[in-house]
Image (spheres, rainbow, N blue to C red):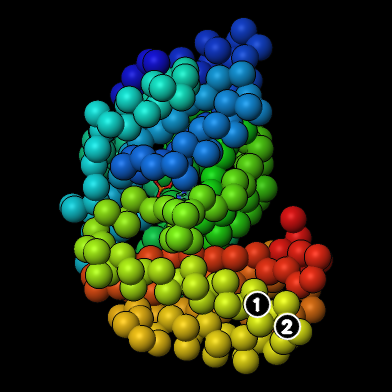
Amino acid sequence: MEILSTPSEARQFTRSLRAKGIRIGLVPTMGALHAGHLSLVNQSQQACDATIATIFVNPTQFAPSEDLSRYPRTLEQDYEMLEAAGIAAVFVPRVESMYPPGFSTYVDPPEIARTLEGNCRPEHFRGVTTVVMKLFQAVPADSAFFGKKDYQQWKVIEAMSRDLDVGVDVVACEIIRESDGLALSSRNRYLDPNERRRALRLSMALKELEQAISAGERDVATLQDGMRQVLVSGDGVSQIDYAVIVNANTLVPLSTLDRPAVALIAARVGQTRLIDNRELCFGSKLLGGR
Ligand code: AMP
């Protein structure tokens, strides 16, 4: 496995593979890798001839009040996991090589970035679209793999890629969960045992939501109330940023479940902010458009 450390090195490496007709899959990450990241790597390995992962904790997507400085960094372990997965290369740029002195060009995010995470974290998606565009330039891949765990991020990148004719096929991968339902996340490392138990409220709220839909409930306000109750009941989450059901494609609020929809939750447990979501189905018919 090659370790690439500058954008020009990454571009040279990628171009040399593509010149030989090798189809490249790109898997962007912020490291502290877990089975969720590995599922993206595996899907890339299956769909493409070679995979290039990236590890970069991107400062421009963190607000000053957020966890940039304490974000988990486990580089040696990450290398071992990626090597074992058999990928061609990992691109691990330093902050100064992505944002050298004088850097001042940003990608203005698409409309779909303005809601939900965009409200809670105003500068976040500008950092995401900028860094993903830079990664697409450094690693001009055929396909890029993103997790539905970050549902809105997937939609933002899809829209950006379409709007800016990026020419990379954006592939979305299903959410990987612990056996008890907790969605895997690098930030789960912040949780102490008590918080880990409380964090289960997110996946429980989504599971109970699905049960209510199976039982025939279609009124979105009622379903959202139900989710919020599960989130806060007992020793629940500390704060709900949002717990909503929206159009799965546009993220516009719905009043009744009559089209492809997704339930999205962001909540805090202690100091840790967690997100989770579920594309919605009733009966055997999936509303999430899969
Ligand atoms: P991150 O390192 O958190 O920026 O995540 C890198 C990529 O992995 C993103 O596309 C995430 O959506 C994806 N990812 C993170 N957690 C999961 C998970 N539990 N299941 C599937 N994909 C995930």
- The foreground one among 287 and 18 is 287
Q: Which residue is mark 2?
A: 215
In the visual, does 125 lie left or right of 158? left
In this view, the residue in front, 93 or 149, is 149
Q: For the view shown, which residue lies furthest in the front direction? A: 179
Res 135 → quadrant: top left
**SS class, disc 2:** loop
Percent across and percent down for residue 220 are 66, 86
Image spot of residue 270 (x, y percent): 24, 73
Residue drawn at x 53%, y 10% as measured from the top left:
16
On-image quarter of the C terminus: bottom right
7 to the left or right of 101: right
Secondary element at image label 1: helix
Tell me the amino acid under the disc marked 2. Ala
Q: Which mark is residue 180?
A: none
Residue 223 in sight here = yes
**Residue at 34 percent of width and 73 percent of height:** 198
Q: Is residue 250 visible?
A: no
Observer-nearest of 193 and 9: 193
Cα distance, mark 1 to mark 2? 6 Å
**Residue visible at 54% across and 53% down?**
175
Kindly identify the residue that appears in the image at 34 percent across and 50 percent down. Answer: 186
The percent position of residue 102, horizontal first and vertical second, equals 27, 42
